[in-house]
Image: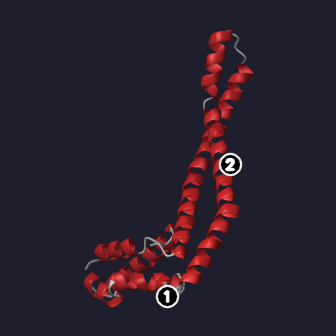
Amino acid sequence: MNKHEYLAKLKEHLDVLNKFELRELLLDYEAHFDSGVRVGKTEEEIANDLGNPVEVAKEIIAERFEYVDQTPVSERGPVTRTLIIIGLVFLNLCLAIPLGLSIWAVWLSFSFAAAALIASPVLLFIELVFSRNVVIAKIFIAMLSSGLGIFLGLGMRNAYGKLRQLTNAYITWNKNMMGDK
């Protein structure tokens, strides 16, 4: 296995790491290859010395993420499962669903605000067509509003990904607590 193949396999199995950390690790392993070649080793020898990239990736991930041993759902008794489900119903109805819907509503309102700001030049054009009164200040305000709307829209796009990820994680946690896989 040459340097390129080794690093590609390592990168493939370390995709759970953040981009910065992944890049730093790959640069470290690339440096191993470079220093090995300088002392006369072949890329295949260096890859063998480093070990199987899949196993290396597993070790790296194990070092960074603590494994939490949970009691398997199958070992929970019916009373425990029933109490967990009742607790989840109250948690979801009294806290999680109202809070989640509120957060999504705020995201939606900011998204509509971004769309309205972006559309402000179009609305100004419609006003100019009907009133035929050109005010230079309105043109500059519409341009500024459109720019702010673009920035707000980009922020809402990023927030959407995070909110969706958070919502899916919460739903998965609920399923795991109830014993549904």
| On screen, residue 154 above or below 17 | above
Q: Which mark is residue 75?
A: 1
Circle nearer the viewer, 2 or 1:
1
Q: Badge 2, how many Cα within 10 Å: few under 14, some, many 20+? A: few
| On screen, residue 178 above or below 55 | above
The secondary structure type at the circle numbered 2 is helix
Residue 100 at x, y percent in the picture: 65, 57
Residue 161 at x, y percent in the picture: 54, 55
Q: Where, quadrant-wise, is the C terminus in this rendering? A: bottom left
Q: Amino acid at mark 2?
A: Val
The residue wearing badge 2 is 106
Q: Nearer the viewer, residue 147 or 117?
A: 117
The secondary structure type at the circle numbered 1 is helix
Residue 20 at x, y percent in the picture: 52, 69
Q: Taking 76 as reference, is 100 left or right?
A: right
- Residue sitting at x 70%, y 14%: 134
Q: Nearer the viewer, residue 170 or 2?
A: 170
Residue 116 appears in which quarter of the rendering? top right
